Amino acid sequence: MKFNMRSARDGVAALAACLVMVGCATGEAREPEHEVEAVFASPSTPSPEAHAGEAAAAEVHADALATYEVPPPKAEHANVGEPASAVAHGLERLNVVTDFSPEVSAPRLDPSAFLDPLASVIGAVEIGQRVYIAPFASLRGDEGQPIHIGNETNVQDGVVIHALETIVDGVGQLQNTVQVNGAHYAVYIGNRVSLAHQSQVHGPAWIEDDVFVGMKSLVFKAHIGRGSVIEPTANVIGVTVPPGRYVKAGTTVTDQATADALPDITDTYAFRSLNEAVVHVNTSFADVYAGRKPAHAPNAKPAPTHPK
Protein backbone atom coordinates (compact mmCIF):
# COMPACT_ATOMS: atom_id res chain seq x y z
CA MET A 1 0.00 0.00 0.00
CA LYS A 2 1.24 3.46 -0.86
CA PHE A 3 2.02 5.89 1.91
CA ASN A 4 -0.11 9.02 1.40
CA MET A 5 1.43 11.98 3.21
CA ARG A 6 -1.49 14.29 2.35
CA SER A 7 -4.05 11.86 3.80
CA ALA A 8 -1.97 11.48 6.96
CA ARG A 9 -1.69 15.25 7.32
CA ASP A 10 -5.42 15.78 6.76
CA GLY A 11 -6.26 13.03 9.24
CA VAL A 12 -4.05 14.50 11.95
CA ALA A 13 -5.43 17.97 11.28
CA ALA A 14 -8.98 16.69 11.68
CA LEU A 15 -8.07 14.91 14.90
CA ALA A 16 -6.37 18.03 16.26
CA ALA A 17 -9.44 20.09 15.44
CA CYS A 18 -11.65 17.65 17.34
CA LEU A 19 -9.38 17.64 20.36
CA VAL A 20 -9.06 21.40 20.71
CA MET A 21 -12.80 21.91 20.29
CA VAL A 22 -13.68 19.56 23.15
CA GLY A 23 -12.93 20.42 26.79
CA CYS A 24 -11.01 17.51 28.25
CA ALA A 25 -12.12 18.01 31.85
CA THR A 26 -15.55 19.68 31.56
CA GLY A 27 -16.78 18.36 28.24
CA GLU A 28 -17.54 21.93 27.15
CA ALA A 29 -16.66 23.03 23.64
CA ARG A 30 -14.07 25.76 23.34
CA GLU A 31 -12.36 27.57 20.51
CA PRO A 32 -8.80 26.60 19.63
CA GLU A 33 -6.13 29.01 20.78
CA HIS A 34 -4.19 28.57 17.54
CA GLU A 35 -4.99 27.63 13.98
CA VAL A 36 -4.92 23.87 13.50
CA GLU A 37 -2.64 24.26 10.48
CA ALA A 38 -0.02 25.71 12.82
CA VAL A 39 0.69 22.15 13.88
CA PHE A 40 2.42 21.70 10.53
CA ALA A 41 3.86 25.19 10.17
CA SER A 42 7.62 25.59 9.93
CA PRO A 43 9.28 27.97 12.41
CA SER A 44 10.00 30.49 9.68
CA THR A 45 9.43 30.96 5.96
CA PRO A 46 12.63 30.32 4.02
CA SER A 47 14.04 33.40 2.37
CA PRO A 48 14.84 33.43 -1.35
CA GLU A 49 18.50 33.32 -0.34
CA ALA A 50 18.16 29.98 1.52
CA HIS A 51 20.88 27.72 0.17
CA ALA A 52 19.88 25.36 -2.62
CA GLY A 53 20.96 22.29 -0.73
CA GLU A 54 17.87 22.41 1.47
CA ALA A 55 15.56 22.49 -1.54
CA ALA A 56 17.43 19.65 -3.19
CA ALA A 57 17.28 17.56 -0.02
CA ALA A 58 13.56 18.24 0.34
CA GLU A 59 12.99 17.15 -3.27
CA VAL A 60 14.92 13.90 -2.73
CA HIS A 61 12.93 13.11 0.40
CA ALA A 62 9.62 13.98 -1.27
CA ASP A 63 10.42 11.66 -4.17
CA ALA A 64 11.31 8.87 -1.76
CA LEU A 65 8.07 9.32 0.17
CA ALA A 66 6.06 9.32 -3.05
CA THR A 67 7.42 5.89 -4.01
CA TYR A 68 7.71 4.34 -0.55
CA GLU A 69 5.44 1.39 0.05
CA VAL A 70 4.48 0.56 3.62
CA PRO A 71 5.33 -3.13 4.16
CA PRO A 72 2.11 -5.18 4.16
CA PRO A 73 1.19 -7.55 6.99
CA LYS A 74 3.04 -10.84 6.75
CA ALA A 75 0.19 -12.63 5.01
CA GLU A 76 2.13 -15.85 4.59
CA HIS A 77 1.92 -16.29 8.36
CA ALA A 78 -1.51 -14.82 8.94
CA ASN A 79 -3.39 -18.11 9.31
CA VAL A 80 -0.83 -20.17 11.18
CA GLY A 81 -1.81 -20.64 14.79
CA GLU A 82 -4.37 -17.83 14.54
CA PRO A 83 -2.05 -15.06 15.80
CA ALA A 84 -3.30 -11.73 17.07
CA SER A 85 -3.52 -8.77 14.70
CA ALA A 86 -0.09 -7.76 15.99
CA VAL A 87 1.41 -9.32 12.86
CA ALA A 88 1.07 -5.79 11.49
CA HIS A 89 4.35 -3.90 11.29
CA GLY A 90 5.28 -1.26 13.82
CA LEU A 91 6.26 2.24 12.85
CA GLU A 92 8.88 1.85 10.11
CA ARG A 93 9.96 5.19 8.70
CA LEU A 94 12.42 6.66 6.25
CA ASN A 95 15.08 8.97 7.63
CA VAL A 96 15.13 12.60 6.53
CA VAL A 97 17.95 14.05 4.40
CA THR A 98 20.39 16.23 6.36
CA ASP A 99 24.05 17.20 6.19
CA PHE A 100 24.81 14.14 8.31
CA SER A 101 22.39 11.79 6.54
CA PRO A 102 22.64 12.49 2.80
CA GLU A 103 20.60 9.50 1.59
CA VAL A 104 17.10 8.26 2.30
CA SER A 105 17.07 4.76 3.77
CA ALA A 106 14.29 2.40 4.81
CA PRO A 107 14.62 -0.20 7.59
CA ARG A 108 15.25 -3.79 6.48
CA LEU A 109 13.59 -6.53 8.51
CA ASP A 110 13.97 -10.24 8.02
CA PRO A 111 10.52 -11.78 7.41
CA SER A 112 10.89 -13.84 10.57
CA ALA A 113 11.41 -10.79 12.81
CA PHE A 114 8.53 -9.26 14.75
CA LEU A 115 8.20 -5.52 15.23
CA ASP A 116 5.51 -4.55 17.73
CA PRO A 117 3.03 -1.97 16.40
CA LEU A 118 4.09 0.40 19.20
CA ALA A 119 7.80 0.23 18.35
CA SER A 120 9.64 2.66 16.05
CA VAL A 121 12.43 1.89 13.57
CA ILE A 122 13.82 4.73 11.43
CA GLY A 123 16.26 4.79 8.55
CA ALA A 124 19.32 2.60 8.06
CA VAL A 125 18.54 -0.26 10.43
CA GLU A 126 18.91 -3.94 9.50
CA ILE A 127 17.15 -6.52 11.65
CA GLY A 128 17.94 -10.22 11.53
CA GLN A 129 16.05 -13.47 11.92
CA ARG A 130 13.61 -14.13 14.78
CA VAL A 131 14.28 -10.76 16.37
CA TYR A 132 11.62 -9.51 18.79
CA ILE A 133 11.22 -5.73 19.14
CA ALA A 134 8.91 -4.86 22.02
CA PRO A 135 6.50 -1.94 22.54
CA PHE A 136 8.04 1.54 22.79
CA ALA A 137 11.48 0.47 21.61
CA SER A 138 13.16 3.11 19.42
CA LEU A 139 15.82 2.19 16.86
CA ARG A 140 17.02 5.33 15.09
CA GLY A 141 19.24 4.94 12.07
CA ASP A 142 18.74 8.59 11.11
CA GLU A 143 22.00 10.02 12.53
CA GLY A 144 24.72 7.43 13.02
CA GLN A 145 24.26 4.60 10.54
CA PRO A 146 23.90 1.79 9.83
CA ILE A 147 22.57 -0.07 12.85
CA HIS A 148 22.73 -3.87 12.79
CA ILE A 149 20.60 -6.16 14.96
CA GLY A 150 21.68 -9.81 14.82
CA ASN A 151 19.63 -12.99 14.69
CA GLU A 152 17.50 -14.01 17.69
CA THR A 153 18.28 -10.78 19.52
CA ASN A 154 15.58 -9.07 21.57
CA VAL A 155 15.03 -5.35 22.00
CA GLN A 156 12.72 -4.98 24.96
CA ASP A 157 10.26 -2.33 26.09
CA GLY A 158 11.57 1.23 26.07
CA VAL A 159 15.02 0.39 24.71
CA VAL A 160 16.75 3.18 22.75
CA ILE A 161 19.39 2.47 20.10
CA HIS A 162 20.98 5.55 18.55
CA ALA A 163 24.43 6.78 17.49
CA LEU A 164 26.66 9.77 16.84
CA GLU A 165 26.95 11.08 13.26
CA THR A 166 28.88 8.83 10.93
CA ILE A 167 28.84 11.35 8.05
CA VAL A 168 29.23 15.14 8.24
CA ASP A 169 28.97 17.22 5.06
CA GLY A 170 29.68 14.15 2.97
CA VAL A 171 32.78 13.14 4.93
CA GLY A 172 32.79 9.82 6.80
CA GLN A 173 33.41 10.02 10.55
CA LEU A 174 35.16 6.71 11.11
CA GLN A 175 35.91 7.59 14.74
CA ASN A 176 32.16 7.26 15.33
CA THR A 177 31.97 3.73 13.91
CA VAL A 178 32.94 0.19 14.85
CA GLN A 179 34.44 -2.20 12.32
CA VAL A 180 33.02 -5.72 12.22
CA ASN A 181 34.04 -8.23 9.53
CA GLY A 182 35.55 -5.44 7.45
CA ALA A 183 32.45 -3.22 7.44
CA HIS A 184 31.76 -0.07 9.45
CA TYR A 185 28.67 0.35 11.64
CA ALA A 186 27.36 2.99 14.00
CA VAL A 187 25.99 0.22 16.22
CA TYR A 188 26.55 -3.50 15.77
CA ILE A 189 24.58 -5.86 18.01
CA GLY A 190 25.33 -9.55 17.55
CA ASN A 191 23.24 -12.69 17.73
CA ARG A 192 21.21 -13.77 20.77
CA VAL A 193 21.73 -10.48 22.60
CA SER A 194 19.16 -9.34 25.16
CA LEU A 195 18.63 -5.60 25.57
CA ALA A 196 16.43 -5.49 28.65
CA HIS A 197 13.77 -2.91 29.48
CA GLN A 198 14.81 0.76 29.15
CA SER A 199 18.45 0.02 28.44
CA GLN A 200 20.30 2.30 26.02
CA VAL A 201 22.92 1.51 23.41
CA HIS A 202 24.47 4.65 21.95
CA GLY A 203 26.98 4.30 19.17
CA PRO A 204 29.68 3.91 18.38
CA ALA A 205 29.06 0.57 20.06
CA TRP A 206 29.66 -3.13 19.39
CA ILE A 207 27.95 -5.82 21.45
CA GLU A 208 29.07 -9.33 20.58
CA ASP A 209 26.96 -12.50 20.64
CA ASP A 210 25.19 -13.89 23.73
CA VAL A 211 25.38 -10.73 25.84
CA PHE A 212 22.78 -9.62 28.39
CA VAL A 213 22.38 -5.86 28.84
CA GLY A 214 20.32 -5.24 31.96
CA MET A 215 17.44 -2.92 32.70
CA LYS A 216 18.21 0.83 32.60
CA SER A 217 21.86 0.24 31.77
CA LEU A 218 23.92 2.24 29.26
CA VAL A 219 26.48 1.16 26.68
CA PHE A 220 28.21 4.13 24.97
CA LYS A 221 31.38 4.19 22.87
CA ALA A 222 32.04 0.69 24.10
CA HIS A 223 32.74 -2.88 22.96
CA ILE A 224 31.16 -5.66 24.97
CA GLY A 225 32.79 -9.08 24.58
CA ARG A 226 30.90 -12.27 23.88
CA GLY A 227 28.93 -13.88 26.69
CA SER A 228 29.20 -10.91 29.06
CA VAL A 229 26.51 -9.58 31.41
CA ILE A 230 25.84 -5.90 32.06
CA GLU A 231 23.71 -5.95 35.19
CA PRO A 232 20.80 -3.50 35.66
CA THR A 233 21.64 0.23 35.98
CA ALA A 234 25.31 -0.30 35.11
CA ASN A 235 27.06 2.10 32.72
CA VAL A 236 29.84 1.10 30.35
CA ILE A 237 31.45 4.05 28.57
CA GLY A 238 34.51 4.23 26.33
CA VAL A 239 35.98 0.82 27.13
CA THR A 240 36.22 -2.77 25.91
CA VAL A 241 34.73 -5.39 28.23
CA PRO A 242 36.57 -8.71 27.74
CA PRO A 243 34.49 -11.79 26.85
CA GLY A 244 32.76 -13.65 29.67
CA ARG A 245 32.87 -10.85 32.25
CA TYR A 246 30.13 -9.13 34.22
CA VAL A 247 29.56 -5.55 35.33
CA LYS A 248 27.86 -5.30 38.72
CA ALA A 249 24.55 -3.48 39.07
CA GLY A 250 24.93 0.26 39.55
CA THR A 251 28.60 0.26 38.53
CA THR A 252 30.03 2.80 36.08
CA VAL A 253 33.07 1.66 34.09
CA THR A 254 34.92 4.41 32.20
CA ASP A 255 38.58 3.31 32.16
CA GLN A 256 40.17 0.29 30.53
CA ALA A 257 42.04 -0.85 33.62
CA THR A 258 38.75 -1.25 35.48
CA ALA A 259 37.22 -3.04 32.49
CA ASP A 260 40.16 -5.46 32.31
CA ALA A 261 39.74 -6.26 36.02
CA LEU A 262 36.01 -7.08 35.79
CA PRO A 263 35.15 -10.46 37.35
CA ASP A 264 34.77 -13.59 35.23
CA ILE A 265 31.45 -15.34 34.86
CA THR A 266 31.83 -18.66 36.68
CA ASP A 267 29.49 -21.55 37.45
CA THR A 268 28.56 -19.87 40.73
CA TYR A 269 27.60 -16.54 39.14
CA ALA A 270 23.89 -15.96 39.76
CA PHE A 271 23.07 -14.73 36.24
CA ARG A 272 25.29 -17.06 34.22
CA SER A 273 22.30 -18.67 32.39
CA LEU A 274 19.98 -15.67 32.39
CA ASN A 275 20.51 -14.64 28.79
CA GLU A 276 19.77 -18.11 27.44
CA ALA A 277 16.38 -18.08 29.15
CA VAL A 278 15.60 -14.52 28.03
CA VAL A 279 16.46 -15.35 24.42
CA HIS A 280 14.14 -18.37 24.56
CA VAL A 281 11.24 -16.23 25.80
CA ASN A 282 11.69 -13.53 23.22
CA THR A 283 12.29 -15.74 20.18
CA SER A 284 9.09 -17.51 21.22
CA PHE A 285 7.35 -14.13 21.24
CA ALA A 286 8.66 -13.43 17.75
CA ASP A 287 7.48 -16.79 16.46
CA VAL A 288 4.00 -16.75 18.00
CA TYR A 289 3.15 -13.07 17.54
CA ALA A 290 4.14 -13.30 13.89
CA GLY A 291 2.19 -16.52 13.49
CA ARG A 292 4.96 -18.96 12.64
CA LYS A 293 4.05 -21.24 15.57
CA PRO A 294 0.71 -21.71 17.29
CA ALA A 295 0.63 -20.94 20.97
CA HIS A 296 1.83 -23.93 23.04
CA ALA A 297 3.27 -25.58 19.93
CA PRO A 298 4.00 -29.24 20.67
CA ASN A 299 7.43 -28.99 19.04
CA ALA A 300 8.45 -25.81 20.89
CA LYS A 301 11.84 -25.98 22.54
CA PRO A 302 11.50 -26.09 26.35
CA ALA A 303 12.90 -23.22 28.36
CA PRO A 304 16.29 -23.92 29.94
CA THR A 305 16.25 -24.68 33.65
CA HIS A 306 18.17 -22.83 36.33
CA PRO A 307 19.84 -24.16 39.45
CA LYS A 308 18.07 -23.28 42.68
Image (cartoon, rainbow, N blue to C red):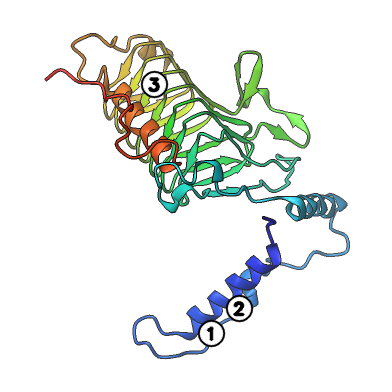
Between the C-alphas of marks 1 and 3, the distance is: 51 Å
Residue visible at 33% across and 13% down in the picture: 245
Q: Residues within 10 Å of mark 1 (few under 14, many from 20)?
A: some
Quarter of the image where one finds residue 74 = top right
Between the C-alphas of marks 2 and 1, the distance is: 8 Å
Residue 132 horizontal/vertical position (percent): 44, 36
Q: Is residue 101 above or below residue 206?
A: below
**Is 79 or 87 nearer to us in this picture?**
79
Query: Does residue 234 appear in the picture of this structure?
Result: no
- Give, as a three-letter code, the residue at label 3: Val
Q: Are marks 2 and 1 in contact (CB under 8 Å)?
A: yes
Residue 217 horizontal/vertical position (percent): 36, 33
Point out the image quarter for the C terminus. top left
Q: Which residue is mark 1?
A: 32
- Give, as a three-letter code, the residue at label 1: Pro
**Is 164 or 243 nearer to us in this picture?**
243
Q: Which residue is mark 3?
A: 211
Helix, strand or loop for disc 1 = loop
**Is 154 or 181 nearer to us in this picture?**
154
Q: Are marks 2 and 3 in contact (CB under 8 Å)?
A: no
Q: Residues within 10 Å of mark 2 (few under 14, many from 20)?
A: some
Residue 267 horizontal/vertical position (percent): 21, 9
Q: Which residue is mark 2?
A: 36
- Give, as a three-letter code, the residue at label 2: Val
Q: Earlier in the sequence, mark 2 or mark 3?
A: 2
Helix, strand or loop for disc 2 = helix
Point out the image quarter for the N terminus. bottom right
**Is 109 or 44 nearer to us in this picture?**
109
Residue visible at 59% across and 29% down in the picture: 186
- Judged left or right of residue 201, residue 9 is right
